[in-house]
């Protein structure tokens, strides 16, 4: 055959070589020179020469690889000439695809377009062959497309995915997604194989979704509660502004990159995750109170978590609304505490009312003290109670009554604790919640020392022991201090009644030769001024009733108008009969009358005649006589003490009736009766009206008449009860 080769035509020389490709199952499969020579059993140089002739004739294609080897293959267009009448081989395969395929060489020039390009860009495939593929890309997107293509050809990536806007034949811009691979080593493709998909609709939907999301975010950001969404894996999908501020997430942070573990400590994150699982397991909304750390603080939130389900009914996420209820919880706690305080106060008030009633039923000081301690010790709030008396000369405390746990009272330094209000000069009670230095058992938490007194007289100090560590709040303290005043008043009343009903009195009398010598102006001292009685009224005031003869009333009026009698406020003439004028004189803060108010005593007689003053006072044996003497000296510095003697009380002493009245009437009722009598209200015609008396006492006329009627009724009952006895 080799000897005949010179007689063959060129076509005959190449036919066996071409048959190697056409007879193969895959005619277009590339082959090397060695492979073809082996099949023909010929030398490679001869085969290479024949293969080159076939390339020149268009029957084969060839490419030299980087390794120096040369590949030969049958072009697809020549595999089946029957396809050439309407379309190419590629076109037949790709014409029904929604995407279009193009082949671009390494310079970016289009080598091939599949038919769907007409649907996507409105252009015929052959119109785009040979053009620069980047020339049809939107100017704003071209740089990114070129960079992606360069990266693909450089081998940095195996696949290129890029989105950009491509120009439609009508001038509009269509969004496309291009996926490409480098097929330059494929002799058939010899370029980048790109798949182009129209994503314009998707892009519009994404834009609409972004706009909807933006509007939704704007709405959610106006909500004061924290709103968020999480998927089933615990990743956040959405957060409103309140939520970001609460969790400390910056506005730039992407919610989908966050989980509870990234935002909170492990314990808090585990708790939140457990609540999320409950939502998905139950497939229903839950409402829970959550403690959320915020900086150094912890805020309480009421969070409602609701599952989000797809069309198949499967939960894919949850939506939560979390409202800060920290202040609400604090208000609820304060309200609960206030209710508890109110209940405790009501309980205390009931106890103290019972104590007050029990104390007021007693007739002696000892009985009052015993009843007070017994009632307090019997109350659930206290363990023991005791009462210490103050020794007048030494100021030492001695226990006069006690009740409750004897062991507790004996263990505590009661005398020391009771003396604290006196030593500190405290105006009110003292309260201690630390008794460790005073020998108290561990179970005892608090101690109160409450002064018992009335006006300026202190009778003792009440001690109260309790095991409550929250004892003696402001309300309880106020009630205890009020109790001290009530008990002090009860003791004062009992002592005064006992003194006034005693068989003996102490009489002291004073004289002043010229009462008005101390005044810097001349006074006509003619006439007689006689004291009848005094009535204590509001604000340390006293109404003094008496009679005046001659010019003595003008003398009183002159003193009232002068600066030398500061305590003399006003004088009112009530009536005049046969030269005797009844008057009402208002004093304020008068030492003598103030002393008589607190001491068991009264003015027996007081007369100013022709400038000379003499007065006599009767006191009970237990009265502080020196205090009475000092009060007179404070007003009348020139007064001489004439007598100070103990004597028998007259059998028919009017003070016995006064004591009974003091026991049966209230202070206001007794004042109304005494003022009416002193002002001549019971005279006919009346020397003073009810309205004038009411004004003097600082009360309304209706209230005054109510007090007076009650006092008159009680007085009649006492008189008739005495007569019947």
Image (cartoon, rainbow, N blue to C red):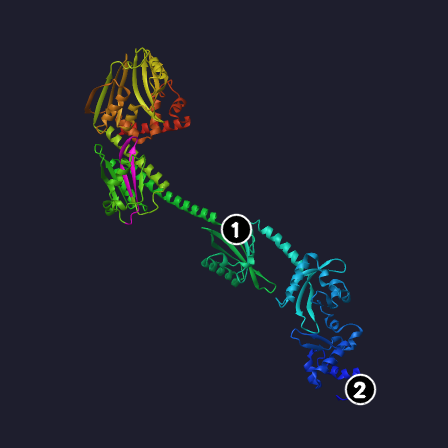
* Magenta segment includes 662: no
Q: In the rendered picture of this protein, how many numbered marks are placed on residues?
A: 2
- Residue 463 located within the stretch drawn in magenta: yes
* Mark in the foreground, 1 or 2: 2
Q: Residue at x 55, y 57 (%)?
A: 255
- Indicate which disc residue 245 carries: 1
Above or below, comparing residue 332 to residue 390 in the picture: below
| Residue stretch in magenta | 442-464
Residue 20 in the figure: left or right of residue 247:
right
**Residue 52 x, y percent position in the rendering:** 74, 78
Element under label 2? helix
Q: Secondary structure at mark 1?
A: helix
Q: Residue at x 45, y 59 (%)?
A: 267
Q: Quick one: quadrant of the N terminus?
A: bottom right
| Residues tagged 1 and 2 counted as in contact (Cβ below 8 A) | no
Q: Is residue 152 left or right of residue 671?
A: right
Distance (Cα) linking label 1 and label 2: 94 Å
Vertically, is 493 above or below 21? above
Residue 7 is tagged as: 2
Q: Which mark is residue 126?
A: none
Q: Residues within 10 Å of mark 1 (few under 14, many from 20)?
A: some
Q: Quadrant of residue 112?
A: bottom right
Q: Position of residue 505 (x, y in %)?
A: 21, 26
Compare residues 651 and 286 and report the one nearer the observer.
286
In front: 211, or 314? 211
What kind of secondary structure does the magenta stretch mostly adopt?
strand
- Spot occupied by residue 128 in the image (x, y as percentages of width and height): 75, 65
């Amino acid at each position: 055959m080799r000897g005949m080769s010179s007689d063959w035509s060129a076509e005959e020389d190449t036919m066996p070589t071409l048959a190697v490709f056409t007879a193969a199952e895959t005619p277009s499969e590339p082959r090397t020179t060695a492979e073809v020579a082996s099949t023909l059993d010929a030398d490679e140089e001869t085969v290479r020469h024949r293969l080159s002739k076939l390339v020149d004739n268009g029957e084969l294609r060839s490419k030299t690889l980087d390794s120096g080897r040369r590949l030969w293959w049958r072009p697809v267009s020549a595999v089946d000439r029957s396809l050439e009448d309407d379309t190419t081989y590629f076109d037949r395969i790709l014409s029904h695809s929604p995407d279009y395929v193009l082949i671009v060489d390494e310079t970016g020039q289009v080598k091939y377009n599949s038919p769907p390009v007409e649907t996507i860009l409105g252009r015929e495939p052959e119109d785009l062959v040979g053009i620069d593929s980047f020339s049809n890309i939107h100017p704003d997107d071209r740089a990114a497309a070129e960079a992606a293509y360069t990266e693909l050809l450089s081998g940095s990536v195996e696949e290129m995915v890029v989105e950009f806007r491509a120009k439609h034949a009508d001038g509009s811009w269509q969004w496309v997604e291009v996926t490409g691979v480098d097929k330059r080593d494929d002799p058939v493709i010899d370029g980048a194989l790109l798949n182009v998909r129209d994503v314009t609709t998707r892009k519009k939907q994404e834009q609409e979704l972004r706009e909807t999301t933006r509007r939704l975010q704007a709405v959610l950001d106006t909500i004061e509660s924290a709103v968020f969404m999480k998927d089933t894996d615990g990743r956040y999908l959405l957060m409103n502004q309140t939520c970001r501020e609460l969790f400390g997430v910056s506005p730039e942070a992407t919610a989908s990159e966050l989980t509870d573990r990234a935002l909170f400590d492990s314990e808090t994150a585990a708790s939140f995750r457990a609540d999320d699982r409950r939502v998905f397991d139950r497939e229903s909304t839950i409402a829970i109170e959550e403690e959320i750390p915020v900086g150094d603080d912890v805020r309480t939130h009421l969070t409602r978590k609701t599952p989000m389900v797809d069309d198949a009914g499967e939960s894919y996420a949850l939506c939560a609304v979390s409202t800060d209820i920290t202040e609400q919880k604090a208000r609820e706690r304060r309200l609960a505490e206030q209710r508890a305080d109110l209940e405790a106060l009501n309980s205390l008030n009931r106890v103290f009312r019972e104590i007050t009633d029990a104390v007021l039923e007693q007739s002696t000081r000892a009985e009052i003290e015993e009843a007070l301690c017994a009632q307090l010790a019997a109350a659930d709030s206290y363990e023991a109670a005791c009462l210490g008396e103050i020794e007048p000369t030494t100021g030492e405390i001695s226990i006069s009554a006690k009740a409750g746990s004897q062991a507790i009272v004996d263990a505590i330094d009661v005398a020391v604790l009771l003396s604290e209000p006196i030593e500190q000069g405290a105006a009110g009670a003292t309260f201690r919640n630390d008794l460790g230095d005073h020998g108290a058992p561990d179970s005892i938490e608090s101690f109160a020392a409450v002064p018992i007194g009335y006006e300026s007289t202190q009778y003792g100090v009440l001690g109260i022991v309790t095991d409550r560590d929250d004892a003696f709040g402001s309300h309880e303290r106020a009630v205890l201090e009020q109790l001290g005043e009530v008990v002090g008043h009860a003791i004062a009343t009992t002592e005064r009644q006992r003194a006034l009903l005693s068989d003996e009195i102490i009489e002291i009398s004073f004289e002043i030769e010229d009462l008005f010598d101390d005044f810097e102006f001349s006074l006509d001292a003619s006439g007689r001024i006689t004291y009848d009685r005094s009535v204590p009224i509001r604000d340390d005031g006293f109404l003094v009733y008496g009679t005046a003869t001659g010019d003595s009333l003008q003398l009183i009026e002159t003193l009232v108008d002068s600066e030398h009698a500061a305590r003399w406020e006003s004088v009112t003439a009530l009536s005049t009969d046969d030269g005797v004028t009844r008057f009402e004189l208002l004093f304020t803060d008068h030492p003598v009358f103030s002393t008589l108010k607190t001491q068991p005593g009264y003015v027996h007689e007081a007369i100013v005649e022709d400038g000379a003053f003499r007065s006599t006072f009767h006191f009970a044996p237990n009265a502080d006589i020196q205090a009475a003497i000092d009060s007179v000296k404070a007003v009348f510095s020139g007064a001489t003490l004439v007598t100070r003697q103990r004597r028998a009380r007259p059998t028919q002493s009017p003070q016995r009736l006064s004591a009974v009245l003091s026991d049966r009437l209230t202070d206001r009722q007794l004042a109304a009766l005494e003022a009416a009598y002193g002002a001549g209200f019971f005279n006919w015609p009346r020397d003073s009206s009810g309205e004038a008396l009411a004004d003097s006492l600082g009360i309304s006329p209706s209230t005054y008449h109510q007090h007076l009627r009650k006092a008159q009724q009680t007085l009649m009952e006492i008189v008739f009860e005495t007569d019947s006895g």
